[in-house]
Amino acid sequence: MASPTISIIIASKDGADTLPPVFEKLTEVAASYDDIEFIFADNASTDKTPDLMQDFSKGRNATVVHEPRPGKSYALNTAMERANGSLLVFIDDDILPANGWLEAYRDAAAHNPDTGAFLGQIRPEFLASAPDWLVHLTNIGKCCGCTPLSLAEGPCPPRFAKGGNWAIRRTALEGLRFDEERTNLRAGVKPTGGQDTEMAHRLERKGAGVRFVPSALVHHQIQPQEMTKEFIFKRYQRLGRGAAAQGNRSFARNLLLPVEIPVLAIISGLGWLFGADRLAAVNMTRLAACLGRAEYILGRAGS
């Protein structure tokens, strides 16, 4: 077996419902390459996730690590410590790689030696009938961890980094680790998230560069319970907390939150009332993110 040039990393907490089809796709990937390895990080799961990881790993160049501290950043950092590849490819436990996915990353890394991070395309795999407004949100990159259809191949802002499908050149890291404090998903009473975007911002600031590779395509399994307005609203509140934790909005902009919140609430409410569902949905996500920002800021001020 050749020394690995690519490490495929998955961190999962209680992913037993979505991992089986992921491993079906990765079986095809494993059969196509002899220079890859898999690193699976079980993040304090209470279901059959560790067993599924062990079963897939049998007879393959794969390692299963156990991170008892709940928090995606903890699990990713533990996995990275065990990875040997020169290119680290990250996907989530509900991601289905398309044909040519890994080859697209390999080609992008080979043809762009000065780029440190590569972002792949993410499209939804709805497991129930999706309303038009939800499809619209995914098409513009505002829901379900999807990338916008309008995003063109080439250099792109780090804000488009999605943890479900991206890759980092090992030499670009130079000791960087995923943030284990402010943006660590599932860590703490009020989870934030955004550790992947935060890492992409740090890579760009150190000159590593970020590039979008649409041919590195995956599909994201969207469960029926994830397709409701309530679920999406709560998710965007969490994303708002994560954005505030990263400090990527000026103090002056944050002062506008008391004005933005009621305005967005009115626009979204009227949109739903009069059948302008796409408009309502977009402003619903903005409202939730603003509420999340305000919640984080007020929580910090009171601590």
Image: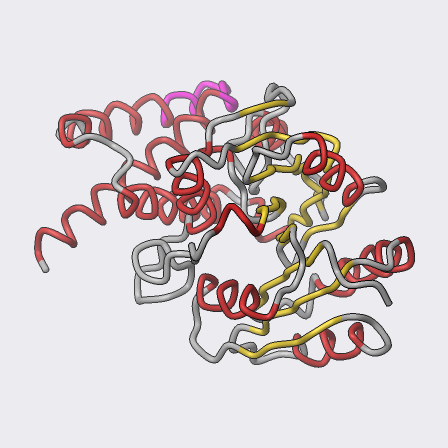
Q: Position of residue 10 (x, y in %)?
A: 63, 61
Magenta run includes residue 277: yes
For the residue pair 303 and 215, the one nearer the viewer reads as: 215
Quadrant assignment for the C terminus: bottom left
In the displayed structure, 144 sits above or below 211; it is: below
Main structural element of the magenta stretch: helix, strand or loop? helix
Residue found 50% across the figure and 32% down from its top:
209
Q: Is residue 240 left or right of residue 143?
A: left
Q: Quadrant of residue 81?
A: bottom right
In the displayed structure, 112 sits above or below 162; it is: above
Q: Position of residue 299 (x, y in %)?
A: 16, 54
Q: Position of residue 40 (x, y in %)?
A: 65, 69
In the displayed structure, 143 sits above or below 222; it is: above
Q: Residue furthest left?
A: 302
Inspect this view and state whether residue 223 appears.
no
Inspect this view and state whether residue 300 appears.
yes
User: What is the tally of numbered marks visible in this picture?
Assistant: 0
Q: Is residue 65 left or right of residue 175?
A: right
In the displayed structure, 275 sits above or below 102; it is: above
Q: Position of residue 115 (x, y in %)?
A: 57, 34
Residue found 14% across the figure and 26% down from its top:
252
Point out the stretch of residues depicted in magenta: 269-278
For the residue pair 77 and 152, the one nearer the viewer reads as: 77
Q: Is residue 203 left or right of residue 13?
A: left
Magenta run includes residue 214: no
Q: Quadrant of residue 12?
A: bottom right
Quadrant assignment for the N terminus: bottom right
For the residue pair 29 and 144, the one nearer the viewer reads as: 29
Colour mapping used in the image: secondary structure
Residue found 53% across the figure and 37% down from its top:
143
